[in-house]
Amino acid sequence: MTTIRMQDLRKSFGKYDVIKGVDLEIEAGEFMVFVGPSGCGKSTLLRLIAGLEDITSGTLAFDEKIVNSLTPSQRGIAMVFQSYALYPHMTVYDNMAFGLKLAKGSADDVKRRVHKAAEMLQITDYLDRLPKQLSGGQRQRVAIGRAIVRDPKVFLFDEPLSNLDAALRVATRLEIAKLHAKMHETTMIYVTHDQVEAMTLADRICVLRDGNVEQVGTPLELYEKPQSIFVAGFIGSPKMNFLTEQFADAYKTDILGVRPEHLEIKDKDGLWKGKLLLAENLGSESFLYIDIGAKEPLVVRQDGSAHQQPGELLCVAPVNNNIHRFDQSGRPAAN
Amino acid sequence: MPMSIIKNTAFYALVAVIVVCAVFPFYYAIITSFRTGSAIFTIEYWPTSFSVANYVNVIASGSFARNLLNSIIVSACVVTLSLLMAVTAAFALSRVRFRGRSLLLLTILSVSMFPQIAVLAGLFEVIRLLGLYNTLGGLVFSYMIFTLPFTVWVLTTFMRDLPVEIEEAAIVDGATPWVIITRVFLPLMWPALVTTGLLAFIAAWNEFLFALTFTSSTETRTVPVTIALFTGSSAHEVPWGIVMAASVIVTVPLVVLVLIFQRKIISGLTAGGVKG
């Protein structure tokens, strides 16, 4: 059970400040997800926690003990890399046992722990194979296994699913969720740029932007009460519609945000009116792109497939007044 | 159709020329080494007589066996030391960020720009100063001048291409730099190690100028010098038969080494470690 506390954590590469003062506390046993667009510093922040990068200034504490100058293994972390990073010349067993052997574990203990982890991930059959004889999904499970055997205090994932194909990604995401349930005493930090992974896995999400923490909260908090336009646009798919000028003025605000799923097509007396540009049919749902005269087409989510034709005039209105109001600076407008 | 025949013919003619140029001198050395007496001086392209007398003479002639051993010791030491230093240097040059890294790399490369003859006099003084004159140690020391720059360069480029994540995974597993080098990188670097080691071996094995200058007694000479200093019964007679037999004996170990290690060069060893 390890809590992680960051205080004014900074990292610069030469002149470039990548992490610009992060204050964050991660609770023991929590599954924290760092999300943000590429270049926001989420991977760097993870590597600072891992000890793979030196901290420029600020403090990083595990259980109130400052670990700034400790090596990754002294910090008791384990990490799963995006590219698996298995040792190509070692068998699966040796890959998993490498760290334990370096830590001078007894032969019996090493064997027992590797087999236990292998069973947990169902890779017992591959233990004497080389990484090149495995598929991508199996390799990533071995990489996870290598991290589990070390019984880490903190478990770090750096975009572990990015290299897998879509179907495998969903399956492995489930595995990781199950893993978290089994290892509920281990603090986990997971970096991704995929907001679906963030929403499904996280206990709490930390949205990063340009080296700063934009907002921290449970997935639902971020979805329902985004503290900025950036978070509002980042969480949720398709992204929230933002309307300005006369559309926003009607709600007495500078910027009006409405999620596609909170809009519905009305037969008449809709609030906004426009021509249908395009309809995307996904079977279970469909997305309508409607030109209501705003800068960008309005996206509306609709259950089932779309029966409307492009060019058709449609009326749209927010459901139950489910809207978000932001001021000029992108923060929620005070009521 | 005629076009492809011409192309094929030209291609195989070129191959034939290359093969003849590369193999003929050695072939001629072999058939000459099996001849004796005046037969040596007739020009024959096929083996006409067979006698091992030259080989017996070479091996029996005083110091040849000793010189062969010297060559083996010197070359083996040069390869071992060069690879040891080059691997550790390559790790620093490819993986540790420090000021002046590329300047250092260029300096190492520039060492190999100087012709041997240019450094000979200075090196002679250095070797005398270190008390290495007329010792095998002196030869090992001086050969590093030309083996280290290319071993360091080749291994540095090779190591730079090894995935950083593998090194980071090892760091997370608690490996020290030495463990990373020996247990993670070395097994992945076999192809590069074999190739550079072999080239260093050949360079040290064939070296002549330093061996001639930095040794003075028969017991410390290496084979190339010994062969050059073979004399016949008079000053004007070159004992071709013995020279050719000695040359063949000296070449065979190189051919054997290349054949052995050619099989050990396994490409694509890193496959499977990272995505790809």
Image (cartoon, helix red, strand yellow):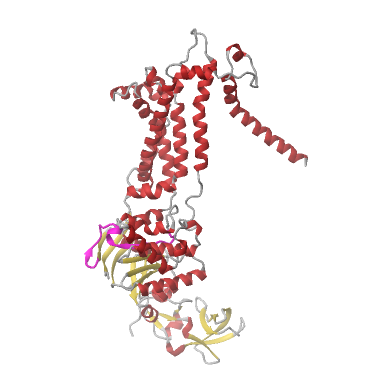
Report which quarter residue A204 is drawn in. bottom left
The span shown in magenta is A62-84
x 32%, y 61%: residue: A109
Q: State whether residue A329 appears in this view.
A: no
Whether A318 is drawn above or below A72: the answer is below
On the image, the x and y values in percent for residue B115 come to: 43, 26
Numbered disc total: 0
Q: Is residue A324 magenta?
A: no
x 59%, y 17%: residue: B35
Residue A3 vs residue B23, the one in the foreground: B23
The N terminus of chain B lies in quadrant: top right
In this picture, residue A186 sits left or right of residue B19: left
Whether A231 is drawn above or below B161: the answer is below
Residue, far top: B234
Report which quarter residue A92 is drawn in. bottom left
Report which quarter residue A22 is drawn in. bottom left
Q: Is residue A63 magenta?
A: yes
Residue A207 vs residue B8, the one in the foreground: B8
In this picture, residue A286 sits left or right of residue A145: right
Whether A237 is drawn above or below A91: the answer is below
Residue, far right: B1
